[in-house]
Image (cartoon, rainbow, N blue to C red):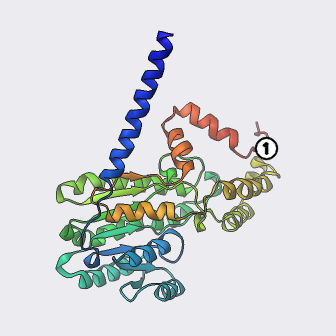
C-alpha cells in the first residue's frame, strides 16, 4: 500500500508540473506586439495554401501585408478577397532579378521603419522519388525554390528587418527533421533547418527573432495526391528498363496506391493550425523558436526523429513499398 501511494503521489506531482508548464507557457505567449497597423509583413508563395491563407488572415487583423505570388491569377484572387492595404507582387524566388526587384519595392514602401517580418513560405514538392530515379537537375530545380529561394529572399530584405528589429519566419517541415523518402524534398528542408539555426544565432545580437515552422501532413499542393501520382508516373516512364526491373513491375502501382490511401488519409484539412502558428511567430511578443503544427508531427514524426537510427529505419522500412527481389 505505501508503495502504491508513493507512486500515485509522484504521478500526480508530475502531472501537476506538466499542467503548470503549459499554463505558464500559454499566459507567457499571450501578449501581442503593439501598433500592427504600421508593421509590414512580406510573405512568399501566396498563390494558394498556407501563404494565401496567412496573407488574408494577417490583412484581416490589421498588418500591412506584402503578398508575393508566382501567377497573375494568384495576385488577382488575393486583391479581390483582401483590403486595399494589402500589396500584391509577382515573385520568382529562383530569379535574382525578381528577388531584387521586390526587395527594392519593399524598401521604398517601408522607409526608415523597416520591415517587420518576412515569411518564407514558397515551396514545391516535385520532382520526388527514390534517389536513383532522379538526376542532378531534378535536385537543382527543387533546391532553387525550397532552399536557395529562402536564402535569397531573406538576405534581400535582412537590412530592412534589422531596422525594425523584426522577424524571419522560415517554413520547413517535419521532413527537415527526419528523412523517410529519397529525392530533393527532404534535402531542401534539412537545408532550411540549418539556415534557420545559423541565422537565428547570427541575428540574436541584432534583436532579430528567427522562427521555424515544421508542419506535418496538411492538404495543400505539396500533398495533393493527383500531383504526386502524376509525378511518380512521369519519373517511372523516364527510367531505363534495368532500373524498372530492379524495382519490379508492380512497384509503380503499389506506389500509387500508397499515395492515394496513406497520404490523403493522414493529411489534415485544417490549414489554420499552421497559419495560427505563423501568425503567432509574426505577432507574439515572445514567439516560440519552433512550431510543429499537426498531431502527426507532434506524436509521431518528431518523436521518431529522436529515436536511434536503427529504430527509425526499421519503422520507416516496414511501411515502404516493397521492391522486386534484388538481383545477385
Q: In the picture, which quadrant includes the C terminus? A: top right
Percent position (x, y) of residue 185? 54, 57
Percent position (x, y) of residue 50? 50, 68
Residue beneath disc 1: 324
View extreme (right): residue = 249
| Helix, strand or loop status at disc 1 | loop
- Foreground residue among 261 and 277: 277
Left or right, 106 with respect to 171, comes to left
**Which image quadrant for residue 29?**
bottom left
Q: How many circles with numbers are drawn on the protein?
A: 1
Q: Going 31% across and 58% down the picture, which residue do you hit?
A: 210
Q: Is residue 300 above or below residue 3?
A: below
Q: Is residue 94 visible?
A: no
Q: Going 54% across and 43% down the picture, which residue do you hit?
A: 299
Mark 1, Cα crowd under 10 Å, few <14 / some 14-19 / many 20+, is few
Percent position (x, y) of residue 183? 58, 55
- Foreground residue among 19 and 152: 19
- Foreground residue among 187 and 83: 83
Q: Going 44% across and 67% down the picture, which residue do you hit?
A: 121
Q: Is residue 100 above or below residue 183?
A: below
Percent position (x, y) of residue 278? 41, 63
Left or right, 51 with respect to 182, comes to left
Q: Is residue 185 visible?
A: yes
**Which image quadrant for residue 231?**
bottom right
Q: Going 41% across and 84% down the picture, which residue do you hit?
A: 89
Q: Is residue 111 above or below residue 253?
A: below
Amino acid at each position: 500500500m505505501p508503495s502504491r501511494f508513493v507512486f500515485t503521489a509522484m504521478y500526480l506531482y508530475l502531472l501537476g508540473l506538466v499542467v503548470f508548464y503549459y499554463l505558464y507557457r500559454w499566459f507567457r505567449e499571450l501578449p501581442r506586439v503593439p501598433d500592427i497597423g504600421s508593421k509590414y509583413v512580406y510573405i512568399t508563395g501566396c498563390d494558394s495554401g498556407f501563404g494565401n491563407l496567412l496573407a488574408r488572415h494577417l490583412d484581416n487583423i490589421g498588418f500591412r501585408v506584402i503578398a508575393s505570388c508566382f501567377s497573375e491569377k494568384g495576385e488577382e484572387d488575393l486583391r479581390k478577397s483582401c483590403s486595399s492595404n494589402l500589396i500584391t507582387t509577382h515573385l520568382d524566388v529562383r530569379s535574382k532579378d525578381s528577388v531584387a526587384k521586390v526587395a527594392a519595392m519593399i524598401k521604398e514602401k517601408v522607409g526608415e521603419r523597416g520591415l517587420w517580418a518576412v515569411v518564407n513560405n514558397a515551396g514545391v514538392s516535385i520532382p520526388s522519388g527514390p534517389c536513383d530515379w532522379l538526376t542532378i537537375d531534378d535536385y537543382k530545380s527543387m533546391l532553387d525554390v525550397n532552399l536557395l529561394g529562402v536564402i535569397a529572399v531573406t538576405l534581400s530584405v535582412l537590412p530592412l528587418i534589422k531596422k525594425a528589429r523584426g522577424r524571419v519566419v522560415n517554413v520547413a517541415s517535419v521532413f527537415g527533421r527526419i528523412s523517410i523518402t529519397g529525392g530533393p524534398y527532404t534535402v531542401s528542408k534539412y537545408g532550411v533547418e540549418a539556415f534557420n539555426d545559423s541565422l537565428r544565432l547570427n541575428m540574436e545580437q541584432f534583436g532579430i527573432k528567427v522562427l521555424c515552422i515544421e508542419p506535418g501532413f496538411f492538404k495543400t499542393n505539396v500533398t495533393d495526391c493527383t500531383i504526386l501520382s502524376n509525378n511518380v508516373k512521369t519519373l517511372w516512364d523516364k527510367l531505363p528498363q534495368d532500373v524498372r526491373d530492379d524495382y519490379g513491375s508492380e512497384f509503380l502501382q503499389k506506389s500509387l496506391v500508397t499515395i492515394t490511401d496513406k497520404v490523403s488519409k493522414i493529411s489534415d484539412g485544417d490549414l489554420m493550425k499552421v497559419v495560427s502558428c505563423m501568425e503567432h511567430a509574426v505577432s507574439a511578443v515572445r514567439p516560440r523558436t519552433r512550431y510543429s503544427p499537426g498531431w502527426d508531427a507532434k506524436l509521431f514524426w518528431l518523436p521518431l526523429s529522436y529515436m536511434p537510427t536503427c529504430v527509425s529505419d526499421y519503422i520507416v522500412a516496414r511501411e515502404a513499398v516493397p521492391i522486386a527481389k534484388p538481383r545477385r
